[in-house]
Image (cartoon, grey):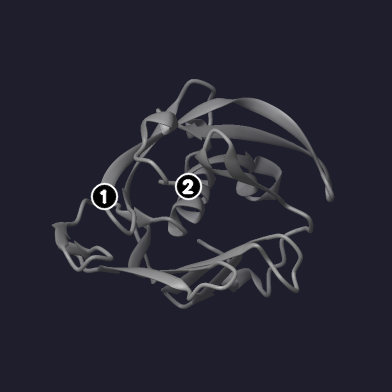
Amino acid sequence: VQWVRVGTRYQVQMDISLGPSFAPLMSRNMTSDGELGEGGLVPRRYDEATKLPFQSPRRAGLQFTPETVTLANGSTREAMPGMQDTASQFVQMTWLFTRQPELLRVGNSISLPLALPRRMDRWTYDVQGEQRLTTPVGELDTFHVKPRRADERPRGELSAEIWFAPSLQYLPVRIRIQQDADTFIDLVMDAAPLQAAPEGGLR
């Protein structure tokens, strides 16, 4: 996961791969570009590329304006205030928790309008509880946040459970991305977050 900020512009990039690095079974790159506003991240473009062995890459993209969202199939929908995409949602929640840590109380819920390549919906994430994780960078106290009714999502649509660490600026230190009951990727932080300079961080 990489976060870059230049002035009011941002980019979030997530790279996921399964299998050996020299010949992954699957890899996916997700990139969100946009601006920082008073309410956090304001996506302008989202691009996604998925690669499988012996197949051409599958690509999907979204375009955002203040009034509309253009989905991967070219259809245009009316934008909802605070709209996020697949990659930006994780940093947006970090921004929210940094400014309103009281949101991370067990039993609370966080609602985000989310634009996916094929549809738009409002997602609700429930704060499940506090959990201490053992990671390569040591033990971390986290809050576990889980999407509501993930099992009722359309077939093949990904959902993500997230563990946020208050001691690391509320960054996600574990993300479990699930497609169905038997297909998931479990990502755990393996190195302390790097920051080029204080002004490069999300404010």
Gap in angstroms between the C-alphas marked 2 and 1:
18 Å
- Amino acid tagged 1: Met
Residue 46 appears in the picture as rendered: no
Residue 34 drawn at (x, y percent): 38, 71
The 10 Å Cα crowd at callout 2, few under 14, some 14 to 19, many 20 or more, is many
Q: Residue at x 60, y 69 (%)?
A: 53
Please tell me the numbered disc located at residue 93. Answer: 2
- Amino acid tagged 2: Met
Q: Residue at x 15, y 57 (%)?
A: 77
Residue 18 placement, left or right of 127: right
Q: Which residue is mark 1?
A: 120
Q: Residue at x 71, y 71 (%)?
A: 23
Viewer-nearest residue: 155 or 54? 54
Look at the numbered discs 2 and 1 and tell me whether their residues touch, using CB distance below 8 Å: no
The 10 Å Cα crowd at callout 1, few under 14, some 14 to 19, many 20 or more, is some
SS assignment at label 2: helix
Residue 103 lies, with reference to residue 28, above or below; the image says: above
Q: Image quadrant of residue 37? A: bottom left
Please tell me the numbered disc located at residue 59. Answer: none
Q: Residue at x 37, y 30 (%)?
A: 152
